[in-house]
Amino acid sequence: MDADDIAAADRARAESDFTIPAEILDAILAGKAPIMAWREYRLITKKALGLKAGVSQSALSRMAKGQSQPRPATIERLSFALAVPEWALTIDQ
């Protein structure tokens, strides 16, 4: 077992204990994109999230409106920036 295996096991363990707050579920059920629901819950501006994840504000807006689907690499960067598992950003898909 190497460091990558240990890191993967740690991530899997952390994700299995992850719960979604009711505020997030309510926002998603009301039609809000998960990425935007998490951004607002974490009190992060679009600009700050975009800078942290390397995504433009206009791309975030398109994702929020359902006009574009983020690529897996973008989901990975956004999940890191928002401190949530990747699946938490795609639960409405």
Image (cartoon, grey):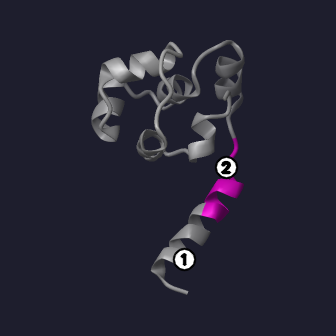
Residue 26 at x, y percent in the picture:
70, 20
**For discs 1 and 2, the disc positioned in front in the rendered view:** 1
By secondary structure, the bulk of the magenta-drawn segment is best described as helix
> Is residue 6 covered in magenta?
no
Residue picked out by circle 2: 18
Out of 72 and 4, give the one closest to the viewer.
72
Q: Are marks 1 and 2 in contact (CB under 8 Å)?
A: no
Q: Earlier in the sequence, mark 1 or mark 2?
A: 1
Residue 12 at x, y percent in the picture:
64, 62
Boundaries of the magenta span: 12-19
Residue picked out by circle 1: 5
Query: Residue 46 vs residue 10: left or right?
Result: left
User: In what quadrant of the picture does the C terminus appear?
Assistant: top right
Residue 8 at x, y percent in the picture:
56, 68
How many marks the image carries: the answer is 2
Out of 24 and 76, give the one closest to the viewer.
76
Residue 33 at x, y percent in the picture:
57, 21
Residue at 62% x, 59% y: name it: 14
Instruction: Please determine whether, in this image, residue 11 is positioned above or below residue 45.
Output: below
Mark 1–mark 2 Cα distance, whole angstroms, equals 20 Å
Residue at 69% x, 12% y: name it: 30
> Is residue 18 covered in magenta?
yes
Instruction: Classify mark 1: helix, strand or loop.
Output: helix
Instruction: Classify mark 2: helix, strand or loop.
Output: loop
